[in-house]
Image (cartoon, rainbow, N blue to C red):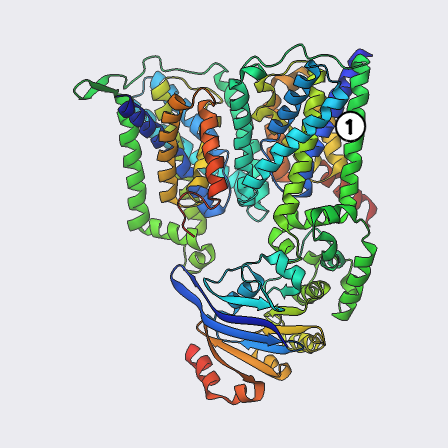
Amino acid sequence: MTLLDIQDVSVSFGGVDAVRNVSLTVEEHQLLGFIGPNGAGKTTMMRIIMGMVRPQQGSVVFRGMDITGLSIHHRVQLGLALAQQIVKPLHTLSMLDNVAIAAGSRYMSSPLWAFLNTDRTQARKRARRLLEFVGIADAADAMPSELPLGYIKRMEVARSLALEPRLLLLDEPLAGLNQTEAHALADLIVSLVNATRSVLLIEHNIGEVSRICPQIYVQVNGEPLIQDTSEKIMASPALRNAYLGDH
Amino acid sequence: MLFIELSIQGLVQGAIYALIALGLVLVYGLLRILHVAHAALYTLGAYFGIIIVNAGGHIVIAIVLSMVLVGLIGIGIYRFAYKPLLDKPPLIALIASIGLFIAAEEVYRIIFGAYGMSFSQPPLQQQIELFSGFHLSASRICVVILSVLFISILGWLAASTRTGVAWRATVSDPDMAASFGVDIERVRHINFFIGSALAALAGVMVALLSNLVEPTMGAVPAYKALAIIVLGGLGSVRGTLIASLALGIIESFGTIYAGHILDRDAIAFAFLIIVLMIRPQGLLIRR
Amino acid sequence: MSYEITILSSMSIAILFALSLNLITGFCGQVSLGHAAFYGIGAYVAAILTKAGWSLTLALFPAAVTAGAVGALVGMASLRVRHDFLAITTMGVGFLFVGIVRKQDALGGEIGISSIPSVAFGRPGLLMLAMICMALFIILCIYIRRSWLGFAFESISDDEDTARTFGIDVSKFKLLAFVIGTAGAGIAGGLYAHHIRFIGPDSFGFVESVTVLAMVIVGGIGSITGVAVAAAVLSTLPLWLQFVDDYKLLIYGSLIFLTMRFAPNGISGIVRALWQRHHSP
């Protein structure tokens, strides 16, 4: 079953093409790696999927529904979630409440419904379990500004999981982490995929991506290059050229 | 005839708005701060102009001295008020700026008196015949000429000097500019100096036109200048200039044709709100 | 006794007015510089209705609804612009309100509306009504704080782009904050008109918008207690100290600036910092 189906999207900013004629599909129960050198348009693709950027051409279909013109909050309500590359924790809230607010997303589907609901204990309970799951339950009551980046990155993963997404987009979750941290977080990412959840992992760290992702999609200069199993991709000369040409 | 007179009135008003709004858009472009207190500098410029002329100074000296003094005070405001707030949310600097502006107006009232000041012998009042039967006061001609002159100088500076290039680089990407060795702090100082000096020029011009300077004279035109930079598309200098002229002309005609329902100041804001409803991104920016 | 009643009435009205702005600026992070316009709308609506024979208690409902409805319109227009520009559009609304009222003969034009009828039971009656409205609004604020609505507001105020990624329809929530806040200002305005018994366009100008902003800022943006205390003090200070009345704007302006520059969380922030220093080793 196809979960996300992107057909022939293009976006240009001020006359420069950021993404050109890209088609990409994510299946149910899939962990798909998405790699490409600098300027490949990875972040732009992620923003197209989330609805932060409208494609000038092409369509985005999610769970059989055309979401090309939908705004971010609708997409989130439909089951898309994003863990951003540059994590923006809410600074006035504790780590637990940062996750709890996402865990209570369904209470905030409309202002009136949000007004009628006061109970935060359920959401906090779920948030605590998620913090345990990503391995940072010890920092639940700390404020985000007091913690190192590794914690914040894990909190972001917990926060996006709290939205109970069918498709989770991870935008460079490993960036800025040291090798041990990156390895551990990559292992965690594998365990996120299950019968009802797929993950699209956008990463710079090819080593970790090829280790954990069965399938990889490669994009170069805003255009699709190849999509195949990771063994074939890693052996392909096209990939090597794309990266060597970059340097 | 009425049409020409209203157009010229609009042009003069638009030139003054442009001088004030330029300073604001310079600060917004560089620091993303809405510099409401800019209005206080415009008023201060007008006071300096009148005081210097009344003390026996020539009007040219008054203009230059007022611009330099207010420019330096502008730098002072940056250092004392805004620099420590740059790492805080933009809301904080905005509210601080509003407080500063209101306090400044009261300080003027206390120091210079509540009833305003006038030139004892207003300069540049002679009527000049532009073409047969059409007269215009020298002060109005002066407003238009000086605005065009200073704005052109500014445009030339930005386009062709090292400092201008550094300034434009800092506006588009401060981190990048810093990594290329641009002294950002110096750029900011120059920015505040020029913006504040232009506001002072506008102040002296308005003093010449109306021969009256009051503590609260900054309020309305400066709010309009804020509206103008929104209309101009936030941070666009060209957009700001066009929006200034548009507002000047719309007000000038609107006062005649819509004056019975709205007063002059309300027209400006009705215009602003209508435009924002139709085009939230400003008048000129194309998506 | 009547002096105390007058002071307590203006205090209660000021607290209600300040908390209504606090809901917009403090809870939801949207700066409004034209809040006095909605205060004015409530005042005019209530005054016209009581002059037509309504009781004030009844007239407060249309006052709130009208102010809230205009608030909704303004919100729909101005919440589309980036948040720091909301300050400018709301300031524009403030000027627009004064500009329009000034030209309407039906509203008394420049002169305004005078000899507004007194309420049942006179001054003590008004005080009672004002205190009840204030108490109800405080309860509403505390409730919202605790509800998911308050949680959503908090996230929007902190970072609206991040709030969107939680599935929050940011503009709808902002609009609701605006409607509740402006309706609250409408009620405060209706009470104010019957407290002063004379209103004109100048009673609701930029000065009043700044005064109420000063209360919210000095009290501590978002803090219900802090804002209520600041509103109580700042509204009565000019009555007690002549020099405060003479230099009202200088003092309010400086307070706003100095608070932002040196203690952005206002009184409540200072108190919290002192308390923490006292209670930690």
In the rendered image, which quarter is residue C17 located in?
A: top right
Who's the residue at 77% across and 29% down the image? C134
Pick the residue in front: B118 or C50: C50
Looking at the image, is B121 positioned above or below residue B107? above
Looking at the image, is B85 positioned above or below residue A156? above
x and y, in percent, of residue C115 in the image: 67, 9
In the rendered image, which quarter is residue C138 located in?
A: top right
x and y, in percent, of residue B73 in the image: 45, 34
Looking at the image, is C275 positioned above or below residue C70? below
Q: Chain of mark 1?
A: C
Please give left or right for residue A7 compared with residue C271 in the image. left
Q: Is residue C89 visible?
A: yes
Who's the residue at 23% across and 17% down the image? B127
Who's the residue at 63% across and 16% down the image? C199
Residue indicated by mark 1: C133
Q: Is residue C239 visible?
A: no
Q: Secondary structure at mark 1?
A: helix
* Quadrant of the rendering where the N terminus of chain B is positioned: top left
x and y, in percent, of residue C114 in the image: 64, 11
